[in-house]
Amino acid sequence: MSDSAFRHLSATPVESLNLVVHHYEHTGTGAVHYHLESDHDEKAFMVAVRTMPKDSTGVAHILEHTVLCGSEKFPVRDPFFMMTRRSLNTFMNAMTSSDWTAYPFASQNDKDFNNLLDVYLDAVFFSRLHPLDFAQEGHRLELEDPQDPNSRLVFKGVVFNEMKGAMSSPVSQLWQGISAYLFPTTTYHFNSGGDPAEITQLSYEQLMSFYKSHYHPSNAVFMTFGNLDVDALQARLESEVLSRFERQTQRWSVPAEQRYAAPVAVQEYYGVDSDDLSGKTHHVTGWLLGSSVDLDAQLEANLLSQILLDNSASPLRRALEQTELGGSPSPLCGLEESNHEMSFMCGVEGSEPEHGQAIETLILDTLQQIATDGVDADIVESALHQLELHQREIGGDHYPYGLQLVFNALPAAIHHGDPVAMLNLDPALARLRANASQPGWVQATVTRLLLNNRHRVRYSLLPDAGLNAEAKRLEQQRLDTIRANLTEQQLQAIRDQAEALQQRQAAEDDPGLLPQVTLEDVKPDIHYVAPDNHYTDTLTTTEYVTGTNGILYQQLIVGLPAFNAEQLSWLPMFTNAWSEVGAGGNDYLTQQIKQTALVGSLSSYASIRGDVDSNQHLHGHLVMSGKALGSKAEDFSALMKETWQTPTFDDNARLLDLMTQMKARREQGVTGSGHSLAMSVAASTLNPVANITNIMTGMPQLVELKQRLKQAQQDGGASLSAALNSLYACIASSPDEALLIHDAPYREIHLDALQQQWPQASASTPIDLPWTPVASANYWMVDSQVNFCAWALPTVSMVNEDAAALSVLAGVMRNAYLHTAIREKGGAYGAGATQDNSSSCFKFYSYRDPRVEGTFDDFAASIDWVLERTNGDDLVEQAVLGLIGGMDRPGSPAGEAKQAFHMDRGGRTRALRQQYRERLLSIRWSDVQRVAATYLQGQEGSKAVIAPRGTQDIAAALGLTAQDF
């Protein structure tokens, strides 16, 4: 590396995270590089550019997609998706936020890391941005029937359909709506993802202009994590990218928002395809706060938000949960800290239009009471305890730990602040603790940040039964107007573009243009986390000693008794409530305060599975799970026992609140997880495991939630209390076994604490659960503008030698056929296939899909394509690499221990997983074709769709049973 390429500005040790943060600046362009030095095996990279759109055309989002469609060095049509199957990456993605666009990846393989670095750097800074890629990923006009020159026009495009799906969610509309008024003049006023009504107004020339102005090293932030050779990395940044640019004079930043002189009240509408509009109004009040790059101000706002809203005993959340003016607290409740200026929001959902003023008054009165009386000092201490625990915890279970840290620091870098300080929180936490311990701190802070803050918005989002139909009418009217005014030459240009795009999508790129890893780079053995000890003298206990950074993890496990079908159907509600009600003689408010003071989390869940080699016999267990700081070991174990043995399910009002909140959360998740729900419905006819999974976690459970909540509202919650008490009476008073995870310094104290609480061994006899399969509708109509399609076919479990070949078949279909057919050509946001070993079935799926019948045709066509292709060993290798990358993806130290424990406990032993890995590595194209012919060809299977309302004619045409949700 040239000595002048980068200046090393600082090196800051962060002891609580066991890393050193290095800050560099490129002398030529001003690009910044933050490296988080760590001994982690997993290395992470991210380049982000500030993207600050001035409209809602989705220019930044569409650019994120098209940037990844070929570059100067890699002139192939789809290098991003091609690399996902030529890589052992543990994470690979791109995402658009309100004021930045980021391109992150992670890998444990050095060769793979360097390959991905090449592709990412060239894509971001030297993208081709072909007009046809803009048409495919953004928007385009096509004839509805390409063979009929007189047919209507339609809008198509991946992002166009993605955002139709995203903006089907009332919560997304709520967030976008209040943000537009909290930020009347800056970039946050606009929908950076794109409003479907405005996306179609974006031109290719505008896209190119935005790229040239924003995608420049002077406007970029590079962040890396892991045990990297920084000199070598920076030499590559210099030679491959930075040396080709000069410093940009434009400094992209978000200005301070203009402040309101008086609070604002706004009422807007969202579409509901139902005549029943009761209980569907949202009322939210939001305040604009100070700069997010002021670390002390950010932590102060975080602590205040924690005090006000953290749990059901927090004063503001308590008021919102207990009010009769709404169903439950709004999902927007809390602090938004990633924008240049922070915002605090609170409110309710499930309300009526006329309650807006009353709810705002309730909020302000509650805040005024806090400003007058303050809160108990223990509540402040508990909130500080939660912040400390959050700072210490090592994540990595949902996406790589290094990238979690990178994204925590990114907003400060984007806003020209100090991302190092955002990681090295201990000094700021010490200052916060000192300030918050002063008498009157809560009173003064709530007054200054909220009560005396006149930049306040009351935003009401009301349901409108005619809005969706009117939006469709206006879109069609616009299309018809465009069609009526087209010249013959313009119409021919639309047809020519559609034909050119089809040819481009059908062309096969040379994969040799891209770098790759091969099966020779794959480790032959699985990564296995073995327990350190197994104790049976008291409560049967499995122990893992690993790097948890001073945090203890504990699980208590008991086998499910022989519940009948009615009792099993109540399990989701029971596990949701078990740790949320009173216990130990305390009411739920006192217990919530106690939990916040002693633990980081305490929750429970139920698991019902088949045998590892059969899905005909069901068995299950309950798990109570918690985490706490090592210094709280004795209190932590005592609280776990207290929650297990002495819950009270007699507070009917509390149970009603919990069920109302649970229903709201599940309903909000439908459009985000529609493909999972569709796959669950499709598989439900195939075997008992798949059936009970659908009944307890799928669309039928949502219906049951609605019905039971309605009944409970009529009987004052008595039906809930009776059902949960009946269920709890069948559960053993002691767990069968425990799982303990901790690091070495806290090993002894954690073990001792557990054994003091559970000195006697206890074990129930495993039993099969009785279950008679329940039929359900398979075409569910919901409030969505797009479809989610699924097709499931019976196959085999993990122990069968064909399971590996079926998994590879799914990867081949996804990579080489379904992606092109359903995403690129069909316009869906996503599509694929998967072999589900846990429920012994093969599943096809699509996500945010404008089509239904055509998608099912493509599912079927993919089988013929596999069987007709003469050679596909290269496709097999790509699919195996993807599967191995997923299997080897690291988690947090605690997460890996939990996963290993439950896999072993459920029969997916180390030996079985090693056998499965070896089978994957031995698959050939002939094996893939054989299992396609054996399990898929000519099979009827089971289909399901999550669809927009009013589309029952499609259900009838497919022979599916439609039901309105």
Image (cartoon, grey):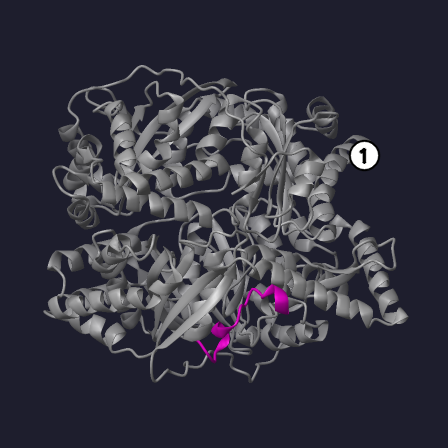
Report if residue 356 lies within the magenta region: no
What residue is shown at x 86% (from left), y 62% (from top)? 496
In the image, residue 455 sits, relative to residue 285, either above or below, namely below
- Answer with the quarter of the image where residue 103 lies: bottom right
> Which residue in the structure is indicated by mark 1?
869
Report if residue 193 lies within the magenta region: yes
Counting from the top left corner in percent of width and height, residue 96 is at: 54, 63
| In this picture, residue 479 sits left or right of residue 116 | right
Q: Nearer the viewer, residue 825 or 414?
A: 825
In the image, residue 726 sits, relative to residue 632, either above or below, namely above
Magenta stretch: helix, strand or loop mostly: loop
As shown in the figure, which amino acid type bears the numbered disc 1? Answer: Arg
In the image, residue 153 sits, relative to residue 273, either above or below, namely below
What residue is shown at x 69% (from left), y 44% (from top)? 852
- Answer with the quarter of the image where residue 790 lies: top right
- Answer with the quarter of the image where residue 476 lies: bottom right
Counting from the top left corner in percent of width and height, residue 859 is at: 71, 37
| In this picture, residue 924 sits left or right of residue 352 | right
